[in-house]
């Protein structure tokens, strides 16, 4: 086993059956599992166990999971947080991401998907220091140093705003970015989501082989976008 295989992951979840499921799945995938059944125990575990990633249920008996994100980020703690949310909680997912959570999975979730999200969040944390200057995924290539975008072997000409949106997605590749985050970063203020959708449509027409079935610039319904 390599060191990375024993990455400590803290599961903050009050439902014993879900904790058991997560413990089994994470251990089987080589993670070292720490567990807390409430918010207070979680803060003690974070201080003692130094988890490299946190899986967070938002509905805890003693506090709102959102307050855990707010407090950790407020203290400058950058540990990746993947939220375990329930179906139909789009507004809460958006709040969690805007507070600094890295990603979310919706219950009931598939284990393969959860493990993939965890690996992406851990990889993203490692890339934050020195972002890859060239992003490559299938037929799409984005060179952030030369500001050059290629799709299907052809250079693509983007408008400055289209490029800014794509650059932001590349810098956070694999991560869900909320509408508000993208608008704040690109326009400097929260604008009309409809406006962002128009730009995304234009961008897809240029970088996707089949814009109506995007492979790279994915929609996270009710939340935002993700580049994969
Ligand atoms: Ca719960």
Image (cartoon, helix red, strand yellow):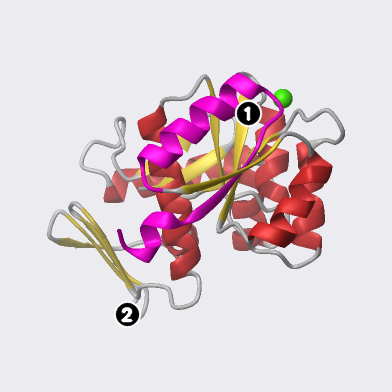
Q: Which residue is mark 1?
A: 85
Helix, strand or loop at mark 1: strand
Position of residue 46 measured from the top left corner of the image (x, y, whole percent): 70, 56
Work out which quarter of the rendered image holds the N terminus and state it.
Answer: bottom left
How far apart marks 2 and 1 lie (CA) works out to 39 Å
User: Is residue 100 rendered to the left or right of residue 170?
Assistant: right
Furthest residue to the right?
62
- Residue at 48% across / 53% down in the picture? 121
User: Does the magenta run of residues contain 218?
Assistant: no
User: Is residue 206 rendered to the left or right of residue 217?
Assistant: left
Furthest residue to the left?
153
Position of residue 57 measured from the top left corner of the image (x, y, whole percent): 67, 33
Crowding at mark 2 (Cα within 10 Å: few <14, some 14-19, many 20+): few
Position of residue 162 measured from the top left corner of the image (x, y, whole percent): 44, 57
Helix, strand or loop at mark 2: loop
- Residue 170 appears in the rendering: yes
Quadrant assignment for ligand 1: top right
Pick the front one: 201 or 62? 62
Vertical position of residue 172 compared to residue 26: above or below: below
Crowding at mark 1 (Cα within 10 Å: few <14, some 14-19, many 20+): many
Vertical position of residue 181 compared to residue 149: above or below: above
Determine the image quadrant of residue 37: top right
Magenta part of the chain: 1-30
User: Is residue 62 rendered to the left or right of residue 20?
Assistant: right
Residue 93 is marked as none
User: Does the magenta run of residues contain 10?
Assistant: yes
Q: Which residue is mark 2?
A: 146
């Amino acid at each position: 086993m390599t060191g990375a295989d024993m990455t400590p992951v803290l599961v903050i979840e009050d439902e014993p059956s879900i904790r058991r499921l997560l413990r089994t799945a994470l251990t089987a995938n080589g993670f070292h599992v720490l567990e807390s059944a409430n918010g207070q125990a979680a803060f003690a575990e974070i201080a003692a166990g130094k988890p490299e990633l946190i899986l967070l249920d938002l509905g805890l008996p003693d506090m709102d999971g959102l307050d855990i994100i707010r407090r950790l980020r407020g203290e400058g703690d950058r540990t990746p947080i993947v939220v375990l949310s329930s179906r139909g909680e789009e507004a809460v997912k958006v709040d969690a991401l805007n507070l600094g959570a890295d990603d979310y999975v919706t219950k009931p979730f598939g284990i393969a998907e959860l493990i993939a999200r965890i690996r992406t969040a851990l990889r993203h944390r490692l890339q934050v220091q020195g972002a890859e200057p060239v992003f490559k995924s299938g037929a799409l290539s984005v060179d952030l140093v030369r500001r050059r975008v290629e799709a299907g072997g052809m250079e693509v000409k983007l408008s400055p705003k289209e490029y800014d949106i794509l650059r932001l997605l590349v810098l956070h590749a694999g991560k869900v970015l909320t509408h508000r985050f993208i608008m704040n970063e690109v326009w400097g203020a929260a604008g009309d989501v409809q406006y962002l959708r128009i730009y995304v449509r234009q961008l897809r027409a240029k970088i996707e082989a089949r814009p109506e079935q995007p492979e790279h610039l994915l929609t996270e319904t009710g939340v935002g976008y993700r580049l994969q």
